[in-house]
Image (tube, rainbow, N blue to C red):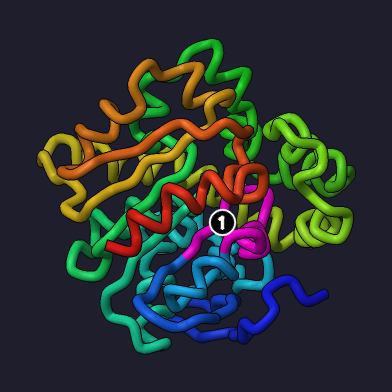
Amino acid sequence: MVVFAGFDEFDLATSQTTIHGVRGGAGPPVLLLHGIPETHLMWHRIAPALAERFTVVATDLRGYGASGKPPSAPDHEPYRMRVMAIDQVEVMAALGFERFAVVGHDRGARCAYRMALDHPAVVHRLAVLDIVPTGEAYARADRNFSLGYWVWSFLAAAAPVPETLIGAAPRVLVEHMLDSWSDRSDAFPAHLRQAYIAPFTDPATVHAICEEYRAAATLDVADDEADRRAYRTISCPTLVLWSATGAVAQWYDDPIGIWRAWADDVRGAAIAAGHFLPEEAPADTLGHLLPFLDY
C-alpha cells in the first residue's frame, strides 16, 4: 500500500526505542505527529502538499503503529509525553535537523506541545490540532468530559482490563472512534481503516497505548502543573486549530484564550470538520498551516 508517493520510509533507533516514519520533500523541516487511533498515515491528504515547500517527516509515536514498544513500568514512565518527545527530537537530529516545526494532532499534539516546552531551542513553530493541554483538560473535567472523553478513563484503567476488552474486539473500538469523532463517513477509505485497525490486534501495541493514557493521567498532568506553577510557557509561535463541531468547541468557550496561558504567541481558528481535521478538511487545514509554517 503506497500512501506517500515519493516519500522514503525509515526505521531509526533512538536512545530508548525505534521510530518508524516517512520523509519527503525539500526545504525547512516539519515534523507531523498523529493521534489515536491512527498512525503517520493520517497525514496522507496534506503531506504531499506540504512537501512541495518543506522537508516533511511523519512518524509513528512510540507504542503506536510500527514504532517500538518499550517495556512498561509500574509508574508508566516509558510512556510519559516528556519521554516520547525525546524520541522525536532524536529522530529529527538523526535526519540532520536540529531545529524544526512540529504539527501534532490529538495525542501527537500533546507530544508536540511538551516538546516545545522542554526543547525550546529545537521547536521554532508549533501547531496543535483539536486539543487543549492535558493539565487543562483534567482540571476542567466534568460530566461532559467523562462521557465524551471516555477513552481517557477506559484506556487509563488498571491493566489488564482495557487490554483484554480491546483484544476481544479491536475493530469495534477503532471504527467507533473513527466514525463517532468524525463528521464525514467517507474520510477513511477501506484500506486506511484496515491500516488503523491492524495495530490494535497486537497486544503489545494495545498495552503501550493504554500505558500512554495511564501516564497522561498521572505524569503528564504533573508535568503540566509544574510548568503552570513555574510560569513556564511555549516561546515559539503557536497555531491552534480545532473542530468547529467537536469537544473543544463545545466544552471550552475560548480555546485561544486557554492556549494563551501556555504560549507567548498564539493564533488559530475553528475548522468546519470533525475531530480528524487533516483527513476531513485537508484544504482548510492546509490553508492555515501553509502561511503559518512558510513565514
Residue under the point 25% across and 36% down:
225
Q: Place residue 126 in its image quadrant.
A: bottom left
Question: Looking at the picture, does residue 198 appear above or below residue 55?
Answer: above
User: On the picture, is 150 further left or further right than 99?
Assistant: right
Question: Looking at the picture, does residue 241 appear above or below residue 254?
Answer: below
Residue under the point 76% across and 61% down:
199
Does the stretch in magenta take in 292? no
Question: Looking at the picture, does residue 81 appear above or below residue 88?
Answer: above
Q: Which part of the image, by quadrant, shows the C terminus?
A: bottom left
Write the start and end of the magenta stretch as one range: 32-46
Q: Which residue is mark 1?
A: 34
User: On the picture, is 47 further left or further right than 178?
Assistant: left
Residue under the point 60% across and 73% down:
68
> In this figure, what is the number of numbered marks?
1
> Which x, y percent locates residue 189?
83, 53
Q: Nearer the viewer, residue 13 or 192?
A: 192
User: On the picture, is 238 further left or further right than 157?
Assistant: left
> Which x, y percent locates residue 118?
24, 59
Question: Looking at the picture, does residue 99 appear above or below residue 158?
Answer: below
> Which x, y percent locates residue 113?
34, 51
Can residue 279 be seen at all in this image of the molecule? yes
Q: Nearer the viewer, residue 153 or 27?
A: 27
Can residue 62 be seen at all in this image of the molecule? no
Amino acid marked by disc 1: His
Does the stretch in magenta take in 35? yes
Seen from this angle, which residue lies furthest left? 230
Residue under the point 46% across and 31% down:
270
